[in-house]
Image (tube, rainbow, N blue to C red):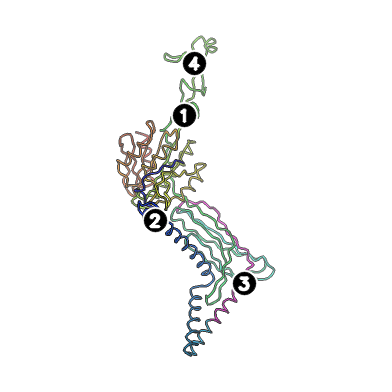
Amino acid sequence: MTTVTRSQTELTNARARIVGEREGFLADAIVWVVRNSAAAGRAIAAVARRVGAVVTALGWSMLVLAVLALTAGYVWGWVEAVVAGWTALVLLVVASGYLIGRTAYEVGLSLPANRVVVGDRAPGEVAVRNPLRRRLPGVRVEVPVGHGLAEFAAPSLAPSEEHSDVFVVPTTRRGIVPIGPVRTVRADPIGLLRREVVWADSLDLFVHPRTIAIPSMSTGFVRDLEGSPTRDLTSSDIAFHALREYVPGDERRYIHWKSTAKTGSYMVRQFEETRRSHLLVALSLSAADYATDEEFELAVSVTGSLGVRAMLDSRTVSVVASAETPEFAKRMVFSARRLSTVNRGRLLDDLSGVETADSALRLAELAQVASEDSAGISIAFLVCGSTPTAAQLRGAAAHFPLGVDVVAIVCDEGAVPSLRRVADLSVLTIGYLEDLQRSLAKRLAT
């Protein structure tokens, strides 16, 4: 990974918002205080969540009522307040009795498939089993699903009996959805206290971006003796194909003298041309490069489609995305995050987790880093939204050496597809994912 620093004036992270371009002891001290205050706040919030997991909001209200009623009753001699205070305390004590005891259930969580395409149905199953020799009472089961919660009421189970419930995970948006861990909840009838027991481990559901089949990209091939043989024939290479008769212009060193002696006419060797193609797909994660969230989702789908097509063509492919500068970094960090291209699933897994950020590298900076990190590129696709201007696209393409075929794909939601040339750069504008197939076919035809 290449790392380059630039002046702090371009930073948009937390440090820049707090102290701007200032450096020195005082600036570092202010940043340290803010940073540690945030950490302390998170620690306090974690403790509060642990306590809040047992005492509900109604339980806290009942406890406050008991303290205030007993204090006022004994100080001012209010018998009614004393009765109310002791009643509240008795309710809390009785509620705590519902939490005593061990929950002996066996609870499991399963997903038929942990990878789905956005919009597909993604079911999950929770199974509750009684492993004891006596009947167990019913219990409430909760399954955190992303930012939501799925709740089930398991009935009373006889020995070795099992109960299962199916829930559906919403997949309306691409992302990585954490599911679980499954917990059983025991609570009093009033709802003052509750006890949670965590059972199964959490699982991740990868909601892949939608991709589309696109035509095989025949451009961007570079002749290379260490490449892969193709069906194209040539008179000079290393993969031997057959013999043919000599024609004027053929090199004499490729004459096959034994066959010439047998046939009485000159015969020359014919070869299969070996080629290589290193395809690069660069996805900008800068929020400034996109006008809407829909443009970014379209750009992610375009990146996935290009990467999958390159793998089907058995090409060498690199997929990179903008890296984000840390919140409290003093200077902007130039780096590119490489996505996995081991196989189709790993690439789409990584694309499921990408998000835009204000401090991520813009398209031109990403192109600069990607061109330095990926040697031997023959064709480069730069994927962005509708906000970069033609000059910015041309500047991004200028970072690649001569001979590299650079194509900028501008994702403009709802726009009419178009193809134009800006100097040596091809600019494809698409409004829908289906436009990518037609636009690439049109570019290959021209």
**What's the amino acid at mark 3?**
Pro
Answer few, some or many: residues within 10 Å of disc 2's Cα (few below 14, many 20 plus, some between 14 and 19): few
Spatial CA span between label 3 and label 2: 62 Å
Task: Tell me the tag on residue 254.
Answer: 4
Seen from this angle, which residue lies furthest front?
25
Indicate which disc, 2 or 4, sits on the residue closer to the N terminus: 2
Of the two numbered discs 3 and 2 in the rendering, the one whose residue sits closer to the viewer: 2
Residue 102 pos. (x, y %): 64, 70
Which comes sooner in the sequence, label 1 or label 2?
Answer: 2
Vertical side of 205 occupied by 73: above or below: below
Mark 1–mark 4 distance (CA, rounded to whole Å): 20 Å
Residue located at (51% from left, 78% from top): 63
Q: Which residues are magenta?
A: 89-118
Q: SS class of the residue under badge 4?
A: helix
Per the image, label 3 sits on a secondary structure element best described as: loop
Task: Give residue 376's position: percent from left, percent from top.
Answer: 44, 33
Residue pointed to by mark 3:
137
What residue is shown at x 46% (from left), y 56% (from top)?
A: 171
Q: Amino acid at mark 1?
A: Arg
Task: Classify 381 as above or below 200.
Answer: above
Residue under pointer 2: 26
- C-alpha separation, residue under disc 2 versus residue under disc 4: 76 Å
Separation (CA) of disc 3 from disc 1: 70 Å
* Residue 256 sits above or below residue 190 on the image: above
**Crowd around label 4: few <14 · some 14–19 · many ≥20 (10 Å):** some
Of callouts 3 and 2, the N-terminal one: 2
